[in-house]
Image (cartoon, rainbow, N blue to C red):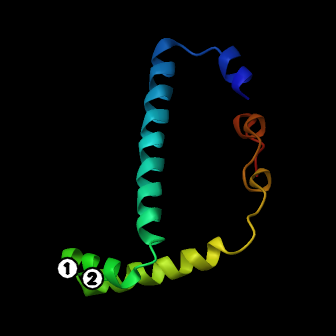
Amino acid sequence: MARQLVNASLNPSDLESLVGLLEGLTKDVASIKADLAFLKSENMAANRKIVSDKFGEIVAKGMEHNAKALAKLASQPAQIIERLTPDFNEYFAGSAR
């Protein structure tokens, strides 16, 4: 796939846009990792208190519920990523399902 991207006829502004998008995604992934580290903390009561003080009890209850759901989801076997995402060639050709 990387070779296809390199061989594609992209102009410099397209490449700059792509780099900007990738940098943004990198920041988003780092933010999500930080959020997950917070949610995975074993001290749920302390986390709930911090969130409750900052954002209110309703938000804290929601985060606790989400953390439990994420923990349950994380304990299940992961699906193969290739089955979840279409091939990029199919996607750009318009034949992805």
The quadrant holding residue 39 is: bottom left
Task: Give the structural element (helix, strand or loop) at label 2.
Answer: helix
Residue 28: percent from left, percent from top: 43, 48
Residue 48: percent from left, percent from top: 33, 81
The quadrant holding residue 35 is: bottom left
Q: CA distance from mark 1 to mark 2?
A: 6 Å
Q: Is there a contact, CB below 8 Å, between mark 1 and mark 2?
A: yes
The residue tagged 1 is 53
Residue 57: percent from left, percent from top: 26, 86
Q: Left of 64 or right of it: where is 74?
A: right
Q: Residue at x 50, y 21 (%)?
A: 14
Q: Left of 64 or right of it: where is 18?
A: right
Q: Left of 79 or right of it: where is 17?
A: left
Q: Residue at x 78, y 50 (%)?
A: 82
Closer to us: 45 or 29: 45
**Above or below, comparing residue 60 to residue 21 in the picture:** below
In the displayed image of the protein, which residue is found farthest to the left? 53
Q: Residues within 10 Å of mark 2 (few under 14, many from 20)?
A: some
Task: Give the structural element (helix, strand or loop) at label 1.
Answer: helix
Residue type, label 1: Asp
Q: Residue at x 75, y 69 (%)?
A: 77
**Above or below, comparing residue 17 to residue 87 in the picture:** above
Q: Residue at x 45, y 56 (%)?
A: 32
Q: From the image, which quarter does the N terminus lie in?
A: top right
Identify the mark at residue 83; answer none if there is no mark.
Answer: none
Closer to us: 9 or 45: 45
Residue type, label 2: Lys
In the displayed image of the protein, which residue is found farthest to the front? 42
The residue tagged 2 is 49
**Above or below, comparing residue 14 to residue 47 in the picture:** above
